[in-house]
Image (tube, rainbow, N blue to C red):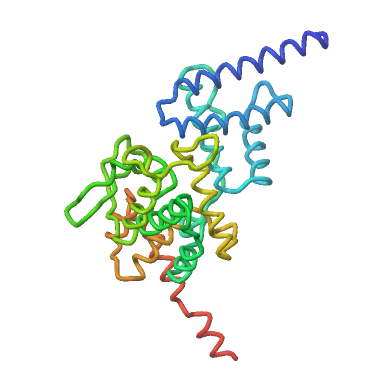
Amino acid sequence: MTMIAAQAQELTEQAGLQALYSRFIAYLDSKPRTVQTYNSALHQFFTWLADKGITQPQRDHVLAYRDDLLSRAKPTTVQAYMVAVRLFFRWTAQEGLYPDIADKIKGAKLNGKRHKRDALTAEQVRTLLQAINQDSPQGRRDYAIVALMVTGGLRDIEVVQANIEDMRQGPGGTVLYIQGKGWDSKDEYISLARPVEDAIKAYLAARGETQGPLFASASNNSKGGRMSTRSISAIVKGHMRAAGFDSDRLTAHSLRHTAGTLNLLNGGTLQETQQLLRHSNINTTMIYLHNLERAANRSEQRIAAAIF
């Protein structure tokens, strides 16, 4: 085979893989955010194959790709990318298009008893909130966002999807209906503590709107529109840094961990915390209890006292 013919065949084979990839993305019956994640993960995989000149990937290639990811990416990223690769080749095998060369290939080993983000103490939360200047509508908005997330244990996507009209009167006061993770509708709600309700109402009064996104963008390009999860994360992270809490393990998601931790520390039961955080499996909530029990374990101090 001539060099030109070999190059033409390689391009044809790569185009065939890309066509399969496009068919798989179209086949997925998942939420847009999940499809986007798989799309990104598979794009990375096919780029890696192209860079290596691999047109007919085999199991050893998938293992090599996994090992390459482990050398340069976080374990959670490796896990997510390998899930996408496994699903893709499971689909190609089901369709009779390509063997399942990724069957039972593991991703990264994750510690299921530790969170990847730290929680704040009650004093640190007070410091964080006090550091937010509320002299402007944007400052009132940011204060309300942080207060809501840290008391309701909200994810950034739940904050983004919340609307003004989702605030209603519930059995014990004002509640906010939210669209929980994996849900298609707003069937769950959190109770708004009075200080949080007051903060949200102060922001809405300054904004002067009675319907639409609960929290609106203040940027020039999308002013008044719905915010993005990236914006929420950046706002929370920026205020954390300004308050003196600058750590890679402190992010917007830390406010959710803070909510679960503070609830348990202040008398909340495991079941109440599960309901607050909307965990479908109580084992997920158990991680918070495990972390608190470990923090209270004074074994090292007792051993050191006995020795020194």
| Percent of width and height locating residue 23 | 51, 18
Q: Nearer the viewer, residue 5 or 130?
A: 130
40, above or below 157, in the image: above
| Percent of width and height locating residue 127 | 49, 68
297, above or below 83, in the image: below
Give me the residue at 68% from left, 45% from top: 72
Q: Nearer the viewer, residue 228 or 31?
A: 228
248, above or below 55, in the image: below
- The quadrant where residue 210 appears: top left
- The quadrant where residue 143 appears: bottom left
Give me the residue at 33% from left, 61% from top: 195
| Name of the residue lying farthest toward the left | 171
Give me the residue at 52% from left, 83% from top: 301
Q: Nearer the viewer, residue 255 or 218?
A: 218
Quadrant placement of the N terminus: top right
Horizontally, residue 199 falls left or right of residue 46, namely left
- The quadrant where residue 126 appears: bottom left
Quadrant placement of the C terminus: bottom right
Give me the residue at 57% from left, 16% from top: 19
Horizontally, residue 161 falls left or right of residue 168, namely right
| Percent of width and height locating residue 82 | 55, 37
| Percent of width and height locating residue 251 | 52, 55
92, above or below 205, in the image: above
Horizontally, residue 93 falls left or right of residue 247, namely left
